[in-house]
Image (cartoon, rainbow, N blue to C red):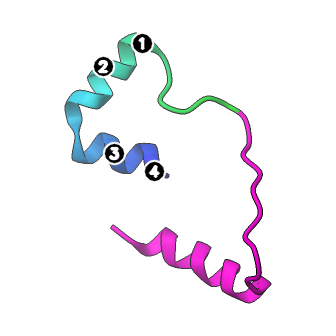
Amino acid sequence: MSASMLFKKFPNLKKFYSRCGVLWRKGYFVSTVGRVSEATVKRYIQEQKTKT
């Protein structure tokens, strides 16, 4: 989702990465969130999806 948004906002970026490969590599990231409730983390993730 973020790559699509970046490519729309910066067309030259899409041209560059079409020659070089992919913007994001397959993989995963793991981190702790400290003393935050599960509900707070879920709300944060949902809010990130709607930001432009």
Give the position of the C terminus as an image quadrant.
bottom left
Task: Estimate the x, y position of residue 47 in percent, counting from the top left.
Answer: 51, 78
Q: Is residue 10 above or below residue 37?
A: above
**Is 14 covered by the magenta stretch?**
no
Task: Report x, y in % for residue 14.
Answer: 31, 29
Say which residue label 4 marks: 2
Residue on which disc 1 sits: 20
Q: Amino acid at mark 4?
A: Ser
Mark 1 vs 2: CB contact within 8 A: yes
State the separation of the CA atoms marked 1 and 3: 16 Å
Query: Three-letter amino acid code at disc 3?
Result: Leu
Residue 50 colored magenta? yes
Residue with the mark numbered 3:
6
**Mark earlier in primary sequence (3, 2):** 3
Q: Are marks 3 and 4 in contact (CB under 8 Å)?
A: yes
Disc 4 from disc 2: Cα separation: 16 Å
Q: Residues within 10 Å of mark 2 (few under 14, many from 20)?
A: few
Q: Which residue is mark 2?
A: 16
- Percent from the top left, x then y, of residue 5? 36, 51
Task: Give the total of numbered labels.
Answer: 4
